[in-house]
Image (cartoon, rainbow, N blue to C red):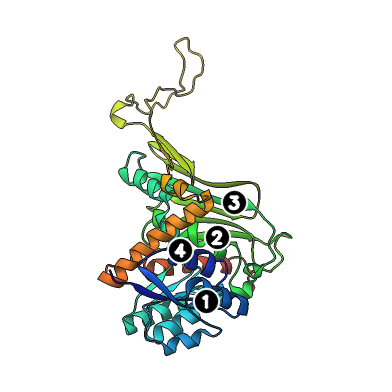
Amino acid sequence: MKKIRVAIIGQGRSGRGIHSVYLKTDARFKIMAVVDFMEERRRRAAEEYACDAYADYHDLFKRRDLDLIVNATYSHMHAPVSLEILKAGYNVLCEKPLAAKVKQVDQLIAAAKKSGNVFAIFQQSRFAPYFVQVQKVIQSGVLGRIVQISIAFNGFSRRWDWQTMQSRNGGNLANTGPHPLDQALQLFGNGIPKITCFMDHTDNSFGDAEDYVKLIMSGRGHPTIDLEISSCCAYPCFVYNVYGTRGGMKGTTASMEWKFFKLGEAPKQKLIKEPLCTPDRMPAYPQENLTWHTGSWPVADTKSKKAGYSAATAATQNLTETFYSMLYKTLTRGTPLKITPEQVRRQIAVIEECRRQNPQIYKRA
């Protein structure tokens, strides 16, 4: 079994809390080096992972024993640092958000093609079990034509960290948004949707980026998608609601249910232009009895429960494992990435347009 030798830039919430924590447990990978500007983080990582530690990521470029560099720097550094990594001749996995501008993504795609190196983006929520189930039901056709999909990733929080700052590519759409937005674009289908976006910056955010987003995506031949990402929702909800012409689906990240009727079982109807009446000639509404078929999807995560993880940690670990298994096949067998830079480019185009439409917050977007 080939072992992938990894360096991780950043030992913060993602670099340490997601990538390092996972990679130290996967026998297919070996952490060779970490980078962080904080001395205590470097010391701790060197001890925990038995690896080298640097204050400057440029020191990694002196090494030829690395198969992959994970870019978990500040959000505003994702694009420029990834570009340096590709130009230095290394495979790179970049954390989300990938960039602030489409032109940055185009530079990265061009650099990856020129170097021939793997360029991956850590959009692990594409593999979330609830989202896989939503896709499965929609693709089965039982719900008919999909008219609208409402997605809410809402909660209540006050924040005062660097991810609330525009200068560091913060805000709800860049922080939380890449997860539901990636899913939403997959459900929208090919092409660039028409964007209508409302943003707000409330007193709960101590930076200058938005903490409320209402995003509507539409297009002829596509479902309308209503996406909310709010930090001002006192009743937290991570929900999906799918509207179809023959049924619907609703649920959370933990469980889903759906119902639908079959055309062949439905009473035959025709348009009646005259007023509808009951048998005794009283005014009436159209009424019929449809036979509803139902389905449900409960989460049964016995593997994580046996390992003693909390629900949140289990979900993160499972998605990270799925993503890295996909990436391992790409690095060792040349298997195409399931999440491509071109797909993420479309996401960045949507984010850029949302900011352009909200000049009261993003004055120079």
Front position in the image: 321 or 83:
321
Q: Quadrant of the C terminus?
A: bottom right
Of the image marks 4 and 3, the number of the one nearer the N terminus: 4
The mark closer to the camera, 4 or 3, is: 4
List the single residue furthest toward the top.
280
Task: Classify mark 1: helix, strand or loop.
Answer: helix
Front position in the image: 186 or 235: 235
Residue lying at the far bottom of the rendered structure: 62
Which residue is disc 2 drawn over?
Answer: 176
- The outermost residue toward the right is 203
Q: Secondary structure at mark 4?
A: helix
Residue 326: which quarter of the image? bottom left
Residue 46, disc: 1
Density class for disc 3 (Cα within 10 Å; few <14, some 14-19, many ≥20) is many
Identify the residue at image location x=52%, y=76%.
46
Q: Which badge, 1 or 3, is on the more N-terminal residue?
A: 1
Amino acid of disc 4: Tyr
Q: Is residue 337 left or right of residue 276?
A: left
Tag 2 or tag 3, which sits nearer the N-term? 3
- Residue type, label 2: Thr
Measured Cα–Cα span from mark 3 to mark 2: 10 Å
Mark 1 / mark 2, whichever is N-terminal: 1
Instruction: Name which quarter of the figure residue 354 lies in.
Output: bottom right
Residue 154 is tagged as: 3
Q: Amino acid at mark 1?
A: Ala
Asked whether the residues under the numbered discs 3 and 2 touch, taking CB atoms below 8 Å apart as contact, a structural biologist would say no
Location of residue 331 in the rendering, given as x and y in whole percent from the top left corner:
31, 72
Q: CA distance from mark 4 to mark 3?
A: 27 Å
Q: Position of residue 272 (x, y in %)?
A: 39, 26
- Mark 4 residue crowding within 10 angstroms, few (<14) / some (14–19) / many (20+): some
